[in-house]
Amino acid sequence: MNYARMVIEKEAPEEYGYDRIRYNLSESSIADQKLSDIGIALLDLTLFYGEHRGDRALRELIAAQDRGLSPDDVLVTAGAAGALFIIATSLLSERDHLVVVRPNYATNIETPKAIGCAITYIDLAFDTGFAIDVDRIAVAMTPRTRYISITCPHNPTGTMMSRADLDRLIALAEEKGCYLLVDETYRDLSYGTKLPTAASLSKRAISVSSLSKAFGIPGIRIGWLITRDVALQEKFLSAKEQIGICGSVIDEAIARAMLERRDSFLAGLLPEMAARRGIVQNWIDKEPLVDWVPPSGGVVGFPRIDVAPNFDLDGFYTRLLEKHGTYVGPGHWFEMPKTFFRVGFGWPTAEQLRGGLAAISAALRD
């Protein structure tokens, strides 16, 4: 493994310093929850080694989100990042090949890079609505392709594929004898029809999710992977055991309490996040220098700045942060031009969001 720090992590707001940011529009989750918000008492919890696959009751709650899944299909991990690491290191070697969409959540690209496998990028384009082109993925496949890596709803654009495209990708993986990895971290924040958990549709599909983005508790580091392939699940479990044996029973107890109130929590959250998305849309409608593909899920979008070729983009981001106290995720976090930036509308308050958007407009004209 040839590790290198990810740009998105080197420049993360927690690394820069939250106290130096007035309007934080760089986050990709809803606002962080407090332990008191979840309403769980932990003082009587016994701090034993937990089940290696993860707490059984927690896995039952995860599996119950879709038909055709059982707790044995679920492996609890240290966040979605932990799941993605286990999958990549279990399936890929220097001799193997990966097909991955770009832009993407950094771990989906950087861990395979560290492994040294061959990578084919399927670049998504603004002008086509960041839509996944299944035909291009099919052409990119080789006999050494171990899996296809996508996110849906997509990070950082918030776009979603159709059910027909999901079915085509699963059929392609089945035909080629590889796997389809779907990072479904924002699935619970779909504003329209929610797609099925990919792993519920085929043994060749692997689903990954977490409680960080849609539930606002990244501090407990709980995610999971789902596969109905028994042999593959055993391989993933072996990797988890070698990395850390089991997860934190404290984290898993908090996660279980959150998922027990999942439906009521999301029922209140989704309308509010849709309203926040509307705030960004209203700003873009009035801002001639910025456009975006409206997100269909999640709490992020990926606007594009429409400026002259000689516009000083580095100066813009510097002014935005140092003069206006506003932080966004520049395009280079996602191996994209700096004319793009990720805006998170779920973490700030509505007032902070409006303030940050106004700051972007001001910084573009300073």
Image (cartoon, rainbow, N blue to C red):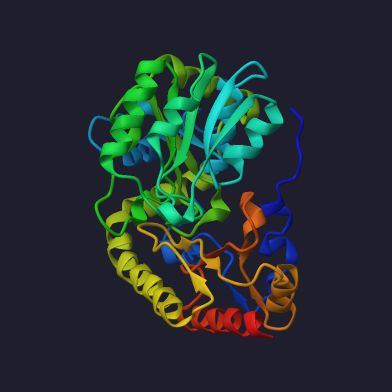
Describe residue 211's horizontal placement relative to residue 266 as left or right: right
Image quadrant assignment for residue 296: bottom left
The image position of residue 279, as x and y in percent, is 41, 78
Image quadrant assignment for residue 293: bottom left
* Residue in the image at 55% along x and 27% along y: 98
Q: Is residue 27 above or below residue 162?
A: below
The image position of residue 216, as x and y in percent, is 48, 60
* Residue in the image at 38% along x and 19% along y: 229
Quarter of the image with the N terminus is top right
The front one of 222 and 361 is 361
The front one of 162 and 18 is 162
Image quadrant assignment for residue 63: top left
The image position of residue 248, as x and y in percent, is 56, 41
| Residue 46 visible in image | no
Describe residue 153's horizontal placement relative to residue 326 as left or right: left
Describe residue 104's horizontal placement relative to residue 7 as left or right: left
| Residue 139 visible in image | yes
The front one of 275 and 336 is 336
Q: Is residue 46 above or below residue 147?
A: below
* Residue in the image at 56% along x and 31% along y: 246
Quarter of the image with the C terminus is bottom right
Q: Is residue 7 above or below residue 98?
A: below
The image position of residue 163, as x and y in percent, is 27, 41
Q: Is residue 288 above or below residue 341?
A: below
The front one of 185 and 339 is 339
Q: How many marks?
A: 0
